[in-house]
Image (cartoon, rainbow, N blue to C red):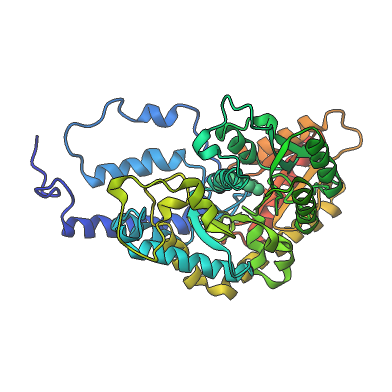
Amino acid sequence: MTPDPAHDSTGDMPPAAFREHGYAVVDRIASYLEEVGELPVLSPVEPGWVADQLPATPPSDPESMEQILADVDAIVVPGLTHWNHPAFHAYFAITGSGPGILGEALTAAFNVNGMLWRTSPAATELEQVTLDWLRQLLELPAGFAGVIMDTASMATLVALAAAREAAGLQIRTQGMAGRADLPPLAIYASTETHSSIEKAAITLGLGQRSVRKVDVDEAYRMDPGALRHTMLEDLRAGVRPLAVVPTVGTTATTSIDPVTAIADVRDEIEEELGGKVWLHVDGAYGGLAAICEEHRHVLDGVERADSFVTNPHKWLFTPIDCSAFYVRDPDVLTTAFSLVPDYLETTDHDVTNYMDWGVQLGRRFRALKLWMVIRWFGADGLAARIREHVRLAGLVVDWVEQHPDLELAAPAPFSTVCFRAALDDHDDLDALNAALMERVNRSGRAYLSHTVLDGRYTLRLAIGNLRTTEERLRDTLALVDEHLADLA
Ligand code: PLP
């Protein structure tokens, strides 16, 4: 083995080398953010290409950072689909902003595990304060207490576990298998709900069949009348309703379920049942719009929820992952999850040990990046960017409505627009729309995604990147136009 002056006796990077490589990496990041808009947004590589470029076995000798970074440029970057690209409009478009990226770097450097308050008081207390700031920005009730989860999927899993606990069925201790005393349990969401609700039911042993998919109206919002009907029918059949999960900003169309009317149904069913029915609101994407005063109404009714989730990694310019989960009564979470082995016992009083609030023991210091993002932009700055994204989406709506060969597929209350090509004389519009999306995406100049609405293939254009300017967006619309004309 050749001795390498870049490695110190510990094998790690000495401070001088860290500075040198660190500055080089920061330079790379700055250049990447400057130039990302010129890269092909959807990675053009074929399946297996990245793996083929890499040795099948790990290096036995140390390699230089220059070699490693050269491979990042040559192998990793071509294999990236650039979520930080201004023409990334697929799924929900996002931004890893400068302050968020620097926050991630500091989190890695501190490398603290925030499982207990004492394992880093700053991790716990910054999380409490930052989530309370976000709570205020969204005008959630003062009693809501927050915890950061990796994703909304995990927050919903934890919420539904809490719902199960709150039902008083002793499932924590007794489990569910082989219990004659346990009625069938049910969770209610709409046909437009995110798959994470069903995944939580799978994970919690409730089974997919426990998830009732309630009908939606013409704007893809849960129908409270249909919800009431389904829940009453279940009650009559001896089914125990556990939770109702409306969504503010559904995944496909960003429709907003009427949370207040749904909370009324929940209250009525609770009365009938004589037991707790949890209300968990999924605002993973749409909930953040409430930062803007004019959009605050999207969270109407959430003050009656038992829990609420929203993802700063979706529409608050915070690098993935960062999901803000709020509960009205944290004691239910700790009753569901707290389990303290001897080695984690502490004598600290009046502190929050976040390990008691969910599944994870070890916890990343995610609050740091969110705290830095909120401070860097300020409340008004955050609202201005969300407002701008909604304005840009309005331009897309206008463009679709004025286009002779396109139609709007759903209302667009946020910054995501569902549309499709609708040519009168075409006999396979699904294939046409799929081909249109494929051509746009393969061009490398923009990235759209799709959904299926009422059985029809539908394109989605989501705006959530801070670098998406009106000019850039108009280029993307021209690109869609060009390929549509070609195909038609
Ligand atoms: N809920 C909604 C409405 C979503 O759109 C999504 C993802 O897009 C999720 C939940 C899941 O989010 P996560 O990836 O944070 O688990």
Please state if 250 lies on the left or on the right of 83 as rendered: right
Quarter residue 354 falls in: bottom left
Residue 404 at x, y percent in the picture? 87, 48
365 vs 448: above or below: below
Residue occupying image coordinates x 11% and y 50% = 8
Residue occupying image coordinates x 69% and y 72% = 293
Residue 199 at x, y percent in the picture? 60, 35
60 vs 402: above or below: above
Please state if 103 lies on the left or on the right of 300 as rendered: left
60 vs 354: above or below: above
Quarter residue 289 falls in: bottom right
> Would residue 438 be seen by someone viewing this image from the given angle?
yes
Quarter residue 450 falls in: top right
Where, quadrant-wise, is the C terminus in this rendering?
top right
Where, quadrant-wise, is the N terminus in this rendering?
top left
| Residue placed most toward the observer, 465 or 235 | 235
| Residue placed most toward the observer, 255 or 128 | 128
Residue 197 at x, y percent in the picture? 64, 40
Please state if 193 lies on the left or on the right of 409 as rendered: left
Looking at this rendering, what residue extends furthest in the right direction?
Answer: 424
| Residue placed most toward the observer, 251 or 214 | 214
> Would residue 27 be seen by someone viewing this image from the given angle?
no
Residue occupying image coordinates x 56% and y 26% = 177
